[in-house]
Amino acid sequence: LGDRKDIDGLSGQEEDNVAPGQGESFEGKSPSFDVRKAYGFTVENLTAKNRQTFDIAEDRKGVVVTFVAARSDAAEKGLVPGIIITAVGTKRVNNVQEFMAEASKSGGKPVLILIQGPKGPGQRTLAILPP
């Protein structure tokens, strides 16, 4: 246990150490909404490189989580890099632009996402709270 200010300070330092390319695909696409600040994670389009990096099956569609901030609600709910987000609310998403458009509609409220692993069956719904 510690002072929340100290924890937030550490979290910011950890986020500065993100590997190049992580989370950059959404930057600049929707200047009014930043999912990393709003919910503590980043997403990218499913590319050949991401499929190889996270060992994602070719039949997966959606966006891939590339970064999850420590101590965020997303991390506490089990969201990890390599997870595929297939829907936001009731709307399927196939790319970062669709994801951002739907996630920005949350207006600072919890965002509901449908996720699945990089391989295998099974899906799960998570409600991610803003900080």
Image (tube, helix red, strand yellow):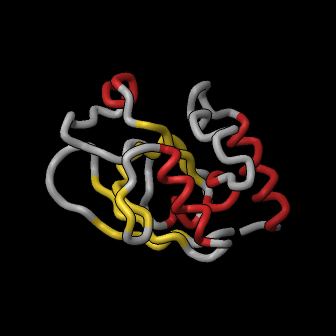
Image quadrant where residue 37 sits:
bottom right
Nearer to us in this view, 106 or 64: 106
Residue 96: give x, y in percent of width and height.
49, 44
Vertical arrangement, residue 26 with respect to residue 86, above or below = above
Residue 94: give x, y in percent of width and height.
37, 47
Residue 74 in the figure: left or right of residue 126: right
Q: Residue at x 64, y 41 (%)?
A: 29
Vertical arrangement, residue 10 with respect to residue 102, above or below = above
Q: Residue at x 29, y 67 (%)?
A: 124
Vertical arrangement, residue 8 with respect to residue 24, above or below = below
Q: Quadrant of the C terminus?
A: bottom right
Residue 110: give x, y in percent of width and height.
56, 75
Residue 36 in the figure: left or right of residue 47: right
Image quadrant where residue 18 sits:
top right
Q: Residue at x 43, y 43 (%)?
A: 95
Q: Residue at x 19, y 40 (%)?
A: 59
Residue 97 in the figure: left or right of residue 31: left
Residue 84: give x, y in percent of width and height.
35, 49
Q: Quadrant of the N terminus?
A: bottom right
